[in-house]
Amino acid sequence: MRDRIRVFLFLALCLVSLARSLAQAAPTQRGVIHVDVVGLRNNNGQVFCALYASAEGFPKDSRKATRRNTSSISDKIASCEFLGIEPGTYAVSVFHDENSNGKLDTNFLGIPREGVGASNDARGHMGPPKFDAAHFQFSGGRFNLKITINYL
């Protein structure tokens, strides 16, 4: 009987030790920012999404973005996801690249010929929206955004 108790205690300690090791080895789960882009006028091309952690470059210079993503379009809707995002302050900009040339086409005044949008559906006045109008707090987990594309 004593031997059974010892074996049981030994196995229980092994299980506890294994559970601790697995818990420590598991990577910390970061958040997901999911963006649904609506209001697209057609299914042509693709949608470019950019996630910014500061006002620097927002919304015009996607090279300054924390993350970038593209999405195909179906039924005039597109979705972008940004994975592994740390909690913080962010803003998202999107544009509808209708002709699939990889850039936002503008006229000679710099006004977009293709659809544009930003988080909080922020819109600019005499120019693009400001980071302060588009930013949101992300505390982790899963965060869902809906951005409506505007054609000027």
Image (cartoon, rainbow, N blue to C red):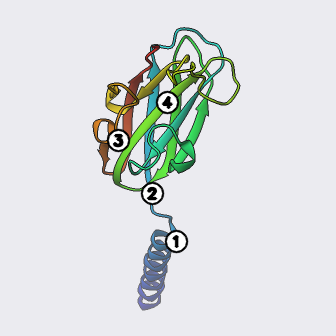
Tell me: 11 left or right of 69. left
Name the amino acid type tagged 4.
Val
- Reading the image, the residue beneath label 1 is 25
Of mark 2 and mark 3, the one earlier in the sequence is: 2
Quadrant in which residue 32 is drawn: top left
Name the amino acid type tagged 1.
Ala
- The residue mark sitting in front, 1 or 3, is 3
Would you call the spot at circle 1 few (<14 residues within 10 Å), some (14-19), or many (20 or more)? few
Residue 133 position, x and y percent, is 28, 36
Would you say the residues marked 4 and 3 are in contact, meaning their CB atoms lie under 8 Å apart?
no
Could you tell me how far apart the alpha carbons at marks 2 and 3 are, in whole angstroms?
Answer: 27 Å
Q: Which mark is residue 29?
A: 2
Of mark 4 and mark 1, the one earlier in the sequence is: 1
- Reading the image, the residue beneath label 3 is 131
Of mark 4 and mark 3, the one earlier in the sequence is: 4
Quadrant in which residue 144 is drawn: top left
The residue located at (43%, 25%) in the rendering is: 117
- Reading the image, the residue beneath label 4 is 94
- The residue mark sitting in front, 4 or 1, is 4
Residue 122 position, x and y percent, is 33, 28
- The residue mark sitting in front, 2 or 4, is 4
Query: Does 140 sit above or below residue 21?
Result: above
The residue located at (51%, 21%) in the rendering is: 109
Of mark 1 and mark 3, the one earlier in the sequence is: 1
Residue closest to the eye, 64 or 2: 64
Could you tell me how far apart the alpha carbons at marks 4 and 3 are, in whole angstroms?
Answer: 13 Å
Query: Does 113 sit above or below residue 52?
Result: above
Name the amino acid type tagged 3.
Phe
Could you tell me how far apart the alpha carbons at marks 1 and 3 are, in whole angstroms?
Answer: 37 Å
